Image (cartoon, rainbow, N blue to C red):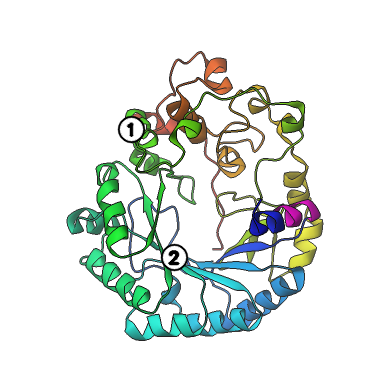
Amino acid sequence: MSLMTEVGQKAFNLGVPIAVHMDVTYRCNERCVHCYLDHDDHGEMTTDEIKGVLDQLAEAGVFFLTFSGGEVFMRRDFFELVEHARSLMFNVKIKTNAVMIHEEEARRIRELGVDTIQISVYSHRPEVHDAITKLPHSLERTVRSIRFLREQGLRVTIANVLMTANYSDHAGVQQLAAELDAQYTLDPTITPMMDGDTSVLALRIPGEELKQVFSNPALVENQEEFCAPPKAPSEEDLEGYSCSAGHSFCYISPYGDVFPCVQFPLPTGNLRQQKFLDIWNFSPQMQEVRSIQAKHLTVCSSCSHLTSCSRCPGLAYVEGNMRGPSTADCEKSFYRTGVPTANMLRLGLSKPQSTTGDTAHLIQIRPIAVPA
């Protein structure tokens, strides 16, 4: 076990919020076709409010801090926020489309000691990437910024979200990442929009293409282990928990709302009304999330995929039940292993029901409230 894994496990066991993802704005200079956010400003926290929250996070034991959006550089005070975070000794990661990063911004990021910058690239082909972002020349500007950042010796990760418009381009993006000396990550997850609109689910790549991705050794390490048939869960497995959401990790919105995770839109409190530690320690919703063990899952507790599935309790929650299955994760587990899940067997399915196109409306999605 690595040192960081050991630290993370200890934080989980003790209920210490060692990592926080904070969106400082939902405003963005791109309009990505798959984005789940409402890009209007409904009253973001001020500079002083965010600094006050950062002080509270430091007091609570947070160490890993991810700044994201929207586009973080839409805030003119963003470097002031990063500087305050670094003064509190947070390990800072930034998620950005990098369109607004030039040489001066890259130099400033290095001077502030930012650990990693994660940048979304959807295709190595400008016509595909720019069609997804709806911003002309966005790929050209993003790639130029990555070069600036790498010249400063900064660690860059290229995040490649797969959807119907770009699923055949992942090899090209991976090659681009290698040419830029950046890390590469791939994610086939498309989530519903904040207002509950499921039309975006039509962008999920079809199952057969998903199967090809999972069986590609250039994209997936330890191929034999990754695609191996699942093993029945043990008694010890049933005593376990889904993920770190609400245990050692949480998400804060630009309006001060606290959620177990960025993909788990269960409101637990607001930092304009309560202290962070009061929400973290005493929120009934946060306590409920922490109480759910694998044995409490209504369908998944009997599933052979239990220990190997990427089941997200947040995605299950937006489908109506945080203790239930996540349709998208069931689909991924099936196409990864070829073995039907308990949820599929319950529904009498030999393969996952499509969650794209005309069937998207069949999933009951819980809308997410935002300030008026």
Q: Mark 2 is on which residue type? A: Gly
Crowding at mark 1 (Cα within 10 Å: few <14, some 14-19, many 20+): few
Q: Is residue 221 above or below residue 273?
A: above
Looking at the image, which is closer to me, 47 or 142? 142
Left or right: where does residue 130 sit relative to residue 48?
left
Q: Which corner quadrant of the image does residue 16 belong to?
A: bottom right
Res. 268 visible in picture: no
Q: Residue at x 27, y 58 (%)?
A: 176
Q: Residue at x 58, y 33 (%)?
A: 308
Q: Is residue 102 above or below residue 9?
A: below
Q: Mark 1 is on which residue type? A: Gln
Residue topped by disc 2: 70
Q: Secondary structure at mark 1?
A: helix
Residue 104 image point, x, y percent: 36, 86
Q: Which corner quadrant of the image does residue 316 belong to?
A: top right
Q: Residue at x 81, y 57 (%)?
A: 282
Residue topped by disc 1: 212
Between the residue at mark 2 and the residue at mark 1, the CA separation in whole angstroms equals 31 Å
